[in-house]
Image: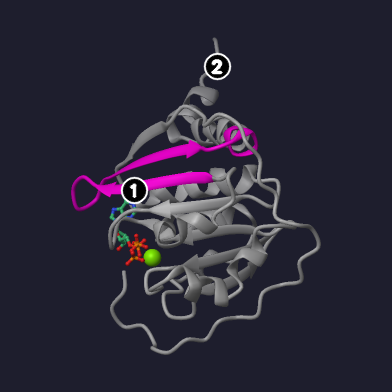
Amino acid sequence: MRSSKPTGPNVIKPITVTKPAVSRSGRPSRPWELVSSSQRQTDRLGQALGRTLRGGETIALYGPLGAGKTSLVRGLAEGLGAAPTAVTSPTFVVIHEYQGRLPLAHMDWYRIRSLRELESTGVTEYFSGQTVTAIEWAEKGLALLPQDRIEITLSHRTTRSRTIQLQGTGPTSGEVLARTRRAYRASSPRASNKKGITKS
Ligand SMILES: Nc1ncnc2c1ncn2[C@@H]1O[C@H](COP(=O)(O)OP(=O)(O)OP(=O)(O)O)[C@@H](O)[C@H]1O
Ligand SMILES: [Mg+2]
């Protein structure tokens, strides 16, 4: 949540771009909707996503203040093998970078006022190469996002539960989400209980 954050822009220089931005067309995947009844469960979803990413994916995060976007990115960082405790909402610095199995660029576009301002920060240079890009308040720069991306919308249900809808807007993201879904199911406490059952 955004309360005691430092002020002033402090945009980290983007990494070197090795490939032009990939923009694929293709049909969006069927939306996958789930209810997370705790922060831990949102974490687990982020971890499953982090473990299944292959590099270069863009994850657009939508949802109101406190919906759990940063919490999900914390799990994602953990799934990528980066230090999750380091993940905070980069509201004022626009971009935080983390290094795990793949590089992760975590952006927050909440305070962005125009597309021109956003472009001037060089964010689109991240949409290529191996960097995984997770963007909070992605709706502020919809026109700049790669066509094939993972879209995640979080909304409040109760104090502790959230509805989370995930969708791939193209073939690559659709495939990643299919794998994420399997990994998420396999990581559920119920799935591990089942594995523990042996026939006598
Ligand atoms: N099921 C849940 N999933 C995720 N977070 C939850 C859940 N239940 C409660 N929370 C709480 O909601 C808050 C979510 O905060 P978080 O910073 O992740 O939101 P955000 O969407 O990034 O907000 P902002 O737009 O301000 O950056 C945390 O305090 C977290 O503990
Ligand atoms: Mg946040």
Residue visible at 49% across and 80% down in the picture: 93
Q: Amino acid at mark 1?
A: Leu
Residue kind at label 2, given as amino acid type: Thr
Please say whether residue 74 is visible from this viewpoint: no
Residue 128, given in percent of the width and then of the height, sits at 71, 57
Residue at 38% from the left image edge and 39% from the top image edge: 165
The kind of secondary structure element at disc 1 is strand
Which one is in front, 131 or 114? 114
Q: Is residue 59 visible?
A: yes
Is disc 1's CB within 8 Å of ligand 1? yes
For marks 1 and 2, the one nearer the N-term is 1
Check disc 1 and report the residue beneath it: 154
- Residue 125: quadrant of the picture: bottom right
Disc 1/disc 2 C-alpha distance (Å): 38 Å
**Image: magenta residue range:** 150-174
Residue 40 is covered by the magenta coloring: no
Q: Position of residue 21 (x, y in %)?
A: 70, 55
- Give the residue number, with chain letter if any, for mark 2: 198
